Amino acid sequence: MGEPNPSSVPAFSAWQPLTFAGVAGLAMAPQWRFRLIRFVMAVFSTVCVTWFASVVFLQVMRHAIDRFPGSGSLRDGHLEWTGAQAIVLSQGTVLTVVMDPELTGEAGQVTDWQIAFGKNTIRFSSIFGYTSTPYPPTWSFTLSRDALEPWWGAWEPIIMAAIAGCSMLFFLIVWGAIGAVYGLFLRLYSYFLDRQIDFGACWRAGQTSLFSAALLLDAALLLYGHGRLDFLGLAFAFGLHFVIPWFYLLGAPLRFPPLYSKGRNPFAARE
């Protein structure tokens, strides 16, 4: 099967990646349109991930620092704490931060994830269990509210910017790589369907098939961060987002232009 003749390819006006026709349309539309939609999708997913990281982790850590006492330190991998033996420093919808020098567990755990600062180790707990890691012996600094607040205030925007930048690059690179793999499948699949399409359009269709799955995962993160979805629901959405693209990979090629027009004998001699 030869490469598609641009003059024989019908014009597509699709601007959305949510239907089979939309995926096929973006694949065969001018490249600037596909790149614009891909950029918008990447920005939206980046905003969702950055918001999730801010609400679930950064804000919780900021509130935990506000609860620190006026004195305390970490010296040579050993925590010196003058407050109560077990206290909840901050609690969000997903993460809880606890100061528990003896790791007694008296503060309890009401969220899916918990960070507990012990005398010699940090314990990370979740619904799957827990793991502990010792403080690096080179860590030596003051753990007072007055010392930590300006430090966190200076680093929080940098962490936010790093999360946003890394997320944006991640989406663009991963979508491009997975789209190339899916593009190989689409090229072969379209060949057996007698569809007029080249690999470049298949590559774009492979990437576009990922956008609906990304929207599902974005929505799940937003709901989970707001406490409207439990971890089991998030896990289900995460697994489902691997399946959704295959519906588009199988259905979108049916909207590609046929190689032969209706009524034409494919075995007739070409003029």
Image (spheres, rainbow, N blue to C red):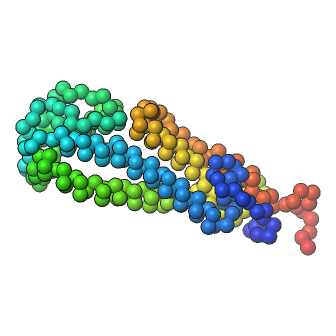
Is residue 156 visible from the viewing direction of this image? yes
Quadrant hosting residue 102: top left
- Viewed as shown, does residue 134 lie left or right of 201? left
Q: Quadrant of the C terminus?
A: bottom right
The percent position of residue 265, horizontal first and vertical second, equals 92, 60
Task: Classify 214 as above or below 4.
Answer: above
- Viewed as shown, does residue 13 lie left or right of 99? right
- Viewed as shown, does residue 204 lie left or right of 112? right
Task: Classify 11 as above or below 90.
Answer: below
Is residue 252 visible from the viewing direction of this image? no
The percent position of residue 54, horizontal first and vertical second, equals 35, 47
Determine the residue positioned at 59% across, 44% down.
Answer: 244
Determine the residue positioned at 11% across, 54% down.
Answer: 138
- Is 2 in front, or is 70? 70
Determine the residue positioned at 28% across, 54% down.
Answer: 156
Q: Quadrant of the N terminus?
A: bottom right
The percent position of residue 191, horizontal first and vertical second, equals 74, 58
- Is 209 in front, or is 228? 228
Determine the residue positioned at 57% across, 43% down.
Answer: 243
